[in-house]
Structures are given as C-alpha cells and as structure tokens.
Image: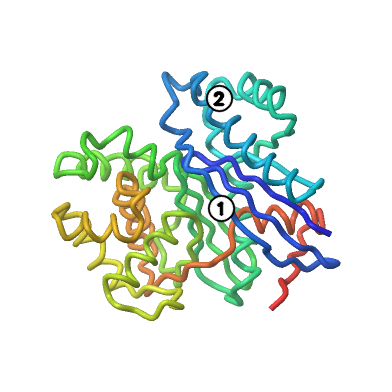
Amino acid sequence: MKQAVIDIGSNSVRLTLYKIDGRSFKIIFREKIMAGLAGYVENGALSPEGIKCACDALFEFRHTLETLIISKTAVFATASLRNISNTEEALSEIESATGFTVEIISGEEEAQLGYIGAMQELNISEGAFVDVGGASTEVVIFEGGKAKTTASFGLGSLSLYRRCVKKILPGGGSMKRIKAAMQAEIDDKKLLPQDKHSPLICVGGTARAALKLAVKYFELPENCHSITASQLERLCDMLCQGDKKAVDLILRTEADRIHTIVPGLMILQHIFSHFNADGLIVSKYGVREGYLCQKILTNSIVTPKTES
C-alpha cells in the first residue's frame, strides 16, 4: 500500500510518499514547496494571499499524486494554521478549494509526533528532542525511552526573522531582539527544567540545514549526522558575523534559507545551551513519520520500526 502525508508548515509545505508493509514503512520520495506561510500573517490572521499560497501548494501536490495514482492522502497543519486568528476560515477555504481535509495538530501533539518520528530511526533512551519550525519550536525531554516533559513555544525561524530582522541577515540590533524574544518565550515561561539532557535529537528544516552547513564548513563526511557542542558554537559564531564568508556558505549550501537560517540556528543553540548538551544528532525522520506511525499505521502509542 502507498500512503501520502502532507505537512502544511509555516515555512514549507511538504509531501512524503510512503510504501507501507504491515506496520513498517519506507519512504518512496519527498517533495517540498517553500511557501513561507508565516510571512503572510497580518495582524494575527493569515491573509487571502497566504490562503491562496497554501492552496497552490496543495494543488501542485494533488497533481503529483494523481499522476502517480495515489488515493490515500493525509494532510495536517502545524503552527501555520494553528497560531492564527482565522484558523476556521482558512481551513474552510483551503478544504473547499482543494478537496483536502486538513487536521490541525496542537503544539504538544506536534512535539510528541516529532519525537516518535525521530525514534523510528534512532535507538536512544535518554536526552532531549527539538524541532525548530517556521513559527514554533517543539521540545521533548525523554528518559527511559519515554517522553517526560513536552513543550511548544510560539517562535520559529521565519517568525523571528519577520519580528526581529530588518535586512537579510541579522545585525547586532536584530540579534539583541532575537535574544530578548527567546528569553521571553522560552526562559521566562520556565516550561523546561534547567538540567543537563544530552544528546539533543533534532528534526526539521533548520536542523537539516545546520547539519549541511557544518558538513561543508568543517569538511565532515557526507554521511555525518551529528555535530559536537564546539562545532555548533563555532558555526553559529561564524554565521552571526554576517560577512561574505557567512553569506557564501549559506548561498552554496542552503540558499532558500538565507533569511531564516541564522534566527533558526540561534533558537537551536539556545535550546542546546539550556540543556548543556554535549552534541546534537539530526534524524532523517520527524513529525510526518510520527503522524504516519501514530495516526495511520497504529492509531495508538505503539511506535513500529522502519524497514532497514
């Protein structure tokens, strides 16, 4: 059986097609559209242009799925439609225009699903999990292979860029505003204990981009999936300089994230420092795989392993 899952995120809309055999799955292909929906939020509401942008992405994916004769498709949205004032209106228009029924998942559920997805690949019983998205950041502390603390914060790489950055890359003033926003949203709310949790398991576009940048900058093996604390600090320091060296590295590696990568990395480094982690590991799976396992394959808390 083949199953498609579409994730309407604040920065990108992503389609993943899976081949399912019993309670195991294998990814056939992935596709993404950098829709940047968080950039269409005006006075707390998703604008008509933003709704059309979401519809256009879904229309493109619908054409792909019809060409491949895929009939089973699940669509969910995270902070892109969750954290706006006109959620019901946007959902109604998107569903009426595209024919897709869209499920909104809460921040806490997004954190849990991301963690479950990552654990389909990794066999790690203790540590912390983080998913830096376009408009929200999800964190899970896990012990003994089980989630103990779950939190969702209303800031992400694209939303921080819009709120705090005046140019393409943040300058000194922008970085002060980003740090103040992280202090208010993450530290002051005291939702996370100030204890050591390591390693930090990361999923999402910011984490994957950080890994690509680290591989390029430090000349690491192409199949590398981890970054040390020292490497993360040095990479962030270099990128935060905002000079030609930083710009060239981003353009050669992750050009479509040139405006969001530094805010996203600052969130990632902030969480990393909060937990005093020794290193981070980037999983190839995430919230879509967690959604597949939790809501489609088992509809329970069981988390089946993938095919090797």
Q: Which mark is residue 93?
A: none
In the picture, the quarter occupied by the N terminus is bottom right
In the picture, the quarter occupied by the C terminus is bottom right
Q: Name the residue that disc number 1 marks.
A: 150
Q: Is residue 145 left or right of residue 269?
A: right
> What residue sits 55% from the left and 25% below the top?
51
Number of residues whose C-alpha sits closer than 10 Å to that of mark 2, classed few (under 14), some (14–19) or many (20 or more): some
Q: Name the residue that disc number 2 marks.
A: 52
Q: Are marks 1 and 2 in contact (CB under 8 Å)?
A: no
Q: Helix, strand, or loop for circle 2?
A: helix
Instruction: Report the amino acid beneath label 2.
Output: Lys
Residue closest to the eye, 255 or 117: 255
Quadrant position of residue 226:
bottom left
In the image as oriented, which residue stretches furthest toward the front?
Answer: 67
Separation of marks 1 and 2 at Cα, in angstroms: 33 Å
Residue 248 in the image: state x and y as whole percent: 22, 58
Q: Is residue 53 left or right of residue 293?
A: left
Number of residues whose C-alpha sits closer than 10 Å to that of mark 1, classed few (under 14), some (14–19) or many (20 or more): many
Quadrant position of residue 29:
bottom right
Foreground mark, 1 or 2? 2
Residue 171 in the image: state x and y as whole percent: 16, 44
Q: Is residue 116 left or right of residue 52?
A: right
Residue 183 in the image: state x and y as whole percent: 31, 44
Q: Helix, strand, or loop for circle 1?
A: strand
Residue 19 in the image: state x and y as whole percent: 76, 63
Instruction: Report the amino acid beneath label 1.
Output: Thr
Quadrant position of residue 123:
bottom right
> What residue sits 52% from the left and 31% below the top?
83
> What residue sits 67% from the left and 64% below the top?
27
Q: Is residue 287 left or right of residue 73?
A: left
